[in-house]
Structure formats: structure tokens, C-alpha cells
Amino acid sequence: MLDDEKLMDVLPMLRLEYMRAKAKHPHFPGDPARALAIVSEELLELARAVNDGEPRKRVREEAAHVAVTAIRFLEEVSE
């Protein structure tokens, strides 16, 4: 599978996760330190899932959480 095809397979999942996250947590901090704490928390959950040998489906879910919080970081922590 080409890299673009892989990306196109992942984007719908990220879009759904993004919409879910925005509905559950409509306010994301604009302060970089607070926003980083949220991204870091999600990254730690991904690390736990990998280190604990969770099924790939669960690991992918946690990776999606990391990606979405990073996107929200970029949106809210403006220049």
C-alpha cells in the first residue's frame, strides 16, 4: 500500500475521533503548558497500551487520541 493510501485509510478514523473529542471536551486550553500536559497524558496512555501488549485495535485507538490532541494543540496554541 502506498503511503498516501495508508493516510487516506487513517484520516476517516481521525476525523471521527476528532469530532468525538470536541463533543466530549469542547474547550481545549490555549496555554501551551496545559495543552502539552493533555498531549503528554495521551502519549503515556499509548505507551501503556503498547507496553502492556494490548491488542493492535486498542493501540491504534490510543494513537488516534495522541494525534487528535496534537491537532487540537496546534489549533488552540496560536502564535
Image (spheres, grey):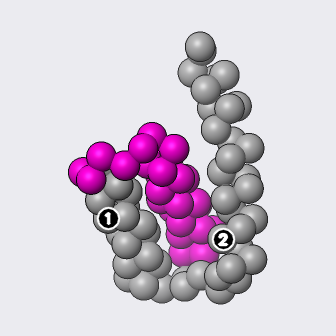
Q: Pointer 1: what residue?
A: 44
Picture quarter with the C terminus: bottom right
Q: Residue at x 64, y 38 (%)?
A: 10
Task: Please tell me whether residue 55 is drawn above or below residue 67 in the rendered image.
Answer: above
Does dot 1 land on a helix, a strand or a loop?
helix
Q: What amino acid type should be assigned to the residue bearing mark 1?
A: Leu
Q: Pointer 2: what residue?
A: 21
User: At which x and y percent is residue 3?
Assistant: 57, 21
Q: Residue at x 42, y 84 (%)?
A: 34
Which secondary structure dominates the residues rendered in magenta? Answer: helix
Task: Please tell me whether residue 12 is drawn above or below residue 72 in the rendered image.
Answer: above
Q: Is residue 41 visible?
A: yes
Q: Residue at x 66, y 22 (%)?
A: 5
Q: Which residues are magenta?
A: 51-77
Q: Report the Cα–Cα distance between label 2 and label 1.
A: 18 Å
Asked if residue 71 lies in the magenta stretch, the reply is yes
Q: What amino acid type should be assigned to the residue bearing mark 2?
A: Ala
Q: In the drawing, does residue 11 fall left or right of residue 70?
A: right
